[in-house]
Image (tube, rainbow, N blue to C red):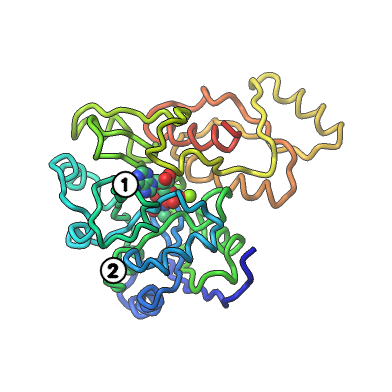
Amino acid sequence: MVKILKKTRIITILRYKTENLKHIAVAAAVIQKGGLVAFPTETVYGLGANALDATAVRSIFIVKGRQCDNPIIVHVADQKQLKKIVIDIPITAKKLIKKFWPGPLTLVLKKKKNVPKDVTAGLNTVAVRMPANRIALALIKKAGVPIAAPSANLSGRPSPTNAKHVLDDLNGKIDYIIDSGKTHIGVESTVLDLTTSPPTLLRPGAISKEQIEKVICEIAVHKVLDSNVLKSPGMKYKHYAPKAKIVFYKSEKMQLAAKELVKKGKKIAILRFNKHPKEIAKNLFAYLRNWDKKGIDIILCEPLDKIKKEGIGLAVVDRLKRAAGG
Ligand code: TXA
Ligand code: MG
């Protein structure tokens, strides 16, 4: 158990404006001193520390309760910072960066020695992305160092898509939260390993396989259940686990099943997929968290084949499968 050690301060910046830079500077100074700052990105909130400070990075693992073999994504504000942490930038990376950065695409590249092994869980690669959020970019720039940041939730909980979610999990354990309201995308970035041939999609996100293949060659998709391959160690943990049990029901059987469960005294929630996948992605983690708070026992979920399996739909299906426990 981590004891409550700190007063977590909140900086509210709903829209990026230059007059807010002085507030961002306060948070950046905390990063420079080895502290922890939760900040918004376009995907989910991240829990940031100076990526080149091994002690600071270790404190991320402690407050999240994160397994130490699960590496962390490093966030950069420009290509200069990227060059400082990777050995070389292959042509595939250059093309993808040109097309998708800043944005929700994380690239796994060969790391330089200055990246502490705590960041990469001992791997010789580092995952890097440039977030498409002006507050995040200003924070990284002002800190003057790349920022290592996993999602700002306790391990095993859904990723936070607003500052309240971060507080619920980490209040008293981190120095600052920059509150910028709800994140745009709602699910974590696409993770693509460029050190394999062909490149491997390790985690689906808002940038789809098809979009990537339009820019580079055909890519492979990592088989999550292929347990002898631990390329992306994070994938083996049960993520996004709500306290409620998720049970799948055909749409026409849903109503009856719901009635029966309520009769038995169960608290239930119903998850239907009649919205566009983008809309589902945006709200999914908030729903899961709310249902936990309400003490829902069972989530009745429509079959996942109701979700269009293209674009961000694949990411939604991936997160729901894992929330349901595989
Ligand atoms: O959208 C996002 O990616 C958010 C925001 C904050 O940027 N971050 C995020 O971080 O989702 P996290 O730690 O929750 O997920 C990072 C994923 C994990 O599955 C981890 O195993 C993988 O990236 N990863 C990190 N470094 C890696 C590496 N060197 N090789 C392979 N996978 C890596
Ligand atoms: Mg996470």
Query: In the rendered view, would you say 195 is above or below 176?
Result: above
Going 35% across and 76% down the picture, which residue do you hit?
A: 32
Q: What element carries label 2?
A: loop
Can residue 189 be spotted in the picture?
no
Relative to 190, 293 lies left or right: right
Quarter-of-image position of residue 140? bottom left
Quarter placement of the N terminus: bottom right
Q: Residue 80: x, y in percent?
A: 17, 62
Circle nearer the N terminus (2, 1): 1
Can residue 109 be spotted in the picture?
yes
| Residue type (three-letter) at the residue carrying disc 2 | Val
The residue that disc 2 covers is 145
Q: Residue 231: x, y in percent?
A: 37, 38
Relative to 222, 217 lies left or right: left
Q: Which of 83 and 268 is in front in this view?
A: 83
Q: Does the residue labelled 1 lie within 8 Å of ligand 1?
A: yes
Quarter placement of the C terminus: top right
